[in-house]
Image: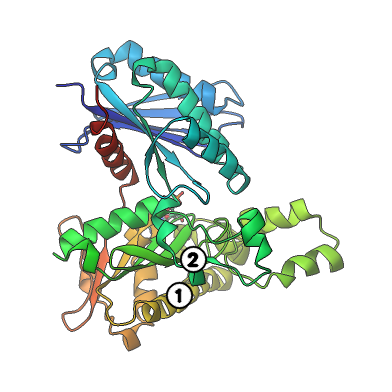
Amino acid sequence: MKKELILVLNCGSSSLKFSILNPISHKKYFFGVVECLFLKKTRVKINVLKKIYKKILPDFSDHSFALSFILNFIKKKFFNYYKKINGIGHRVVHGGINIKKSSIINKKIIFEIKRSSIFAPLHNPSNLIGIKISKKFFPHLSKKNVAVFDTSFHSSLPKVSYLYSIPYKFYKKHNIRRYGAHGISHNYVMQKSSKILNKSEKSLNIISCHLGNGSSITAIKNGRSIDTSMGLTPLEGLIMGTRSGDLDPAIIFFMYKKLGLSLEKIEEILTKKSGLLGISEKSSDCRYSEKNFKKSEQSKLAIEMFCYRLSKYIGAYSILLENRLDALIFTGGIGENSQLIRKKVVSKLSLLGFYLDQKLNISVNKNNYFINKKKSRSILVIPTNEELFIALETQKLIKLIKE
Ligand code: ADP
């Protein structure tokens, strides 16, 4: 094996995911996750060539400790693979106003990531720690660290879509605008659907629904994002696991002035206690509400509201695509797995010419992405693969570096 593996790092707010893969064959050699960072019983799980290693780390471990643990583990036990790493791709949540594409990490990029932390305070600082630690472990690859941004796919949004109708100075002075998120996933499924539909990206019009704990929908015209449901932050838009998505901003004033709740408390309610969890009053997990759909009125409501909001967005976004809508795409944990959500959403879309084939909806798999009836527009279920996308972007950029 040549020196050709890519290490992909995704340092989230309280978790850390990583993988080591070959960007040419797409073969994944290592992948793993650290959960419960900053909490008790921080745990790490590493999959190596079909074997699983588990370990409990010291309570309240942080990203720096956890990542050092993983890299030391691989270095010690699997040096043959470790030494073949030739580039490192970092998922970075927010690129701010200036970054429009994946970039080799240099001082300017670090500055922009730091500057954009104001919009992603739980994520960008963790991403910076991932960059620092990987440079420490791989000093010879210090020019081969690549940042792949969740916001950059949405840098093509037109002004009418990204501006909020608040005084213009808040945009000009403070960069308050829609940035969107999940761009890596939306971009990946756009590229994949272009292959499946045998249509060039430049002439592809689709609506991509990334439905997971966090959910967002993007209107993609001629291969470019023209509108997306997440806004300045990932709080706006669809109903999510624990996030409210769209609401009347006056609810915040009401909670603050009339109910006497602090701003911190309101933020916690809207980001951590709302969405499927808030409506069902039981769980943020879609599977719970599905399981209890017939037994619990509130679980049923959670599912119905989730689908109602999503179908409303699909209707609105279809108008933006004007003269052509090639396909509706479902991806993310819910989009890929929930037959019920797909069925309920598509049942509301006959005006747009979408009709579900229930047999295909149930049997959808890697070899058959389509779940629509013959007379319908295309509806596809495409498993997202953000780490592969990051590895490919990393490979593309480091190939341009002169050794
Ligand atoms: P994240 O945003 O954290 O990446 P995921 O994309 O992994 O989230 O999606 C997590 C969501 O997917 C959870 O709400 C979970 O309930 C849902 N999910 C996973 N498997 C299924 C399934 N078989 N049926 C319904 N929902 C599922």
Q: At which x and y percent is residue 1?
A: 14, 21
In percent of the image, x 62 and y 72: which residue is there? 165
148 to the left or right of 22: right
Q: At which x and y percent is residue 99?
A: 45, 47
Q: Which residue is mark 1?
A: 313
Q: Which residue is mark 2?
A: 229
250 to the left or right of 92: right
Residue found farthest to the bottom = 351
For residue 242, which quarter of the picture? bottom right
Disc 2 to disc 1: CB gap under 8 Å = yes
Front residue (pair 68, 49): 68
Helix, strand, or loop for circle 1?
A: helix
Residue found farthest to the top = 76
Front residue (pair 218, 48): 218
Looking at the picture, which amino acid does disc 2 mark? Ser
In percent of the image, x 41 and y 16: which residue is there? 137
Q: How many marks?
A: 2
For residue 383, which quarter of the picture? bottom left
Of the four image quadrants, the one with ligand 1 is bottom left
In percent of the image, x 26 and y 77: which residue is there? 356
Looking at the picture, which amino acid does disc 1 mark? Tyr
Front residue (pair 348, 115): 115
**Disc 1 CB within 8 Å of nearest ligand 1 atom:** no
Mark 2: few/some/many CA within 10 Å (<14, 14-19, 20+)? many
Mark 1: few/some/many CA within 10 Å (<14, 14-19, 20+)? many
User: Could you tell me if residue 368 is visible in this image?
Assistant: no
Task: Please name the colour scheme applied to the rendered image.
Answer: rainbow
Q: Is residue 307 above or below residue 63?
A: below
**Label 2 to label 1, Cα distance in Å?**
8 Å
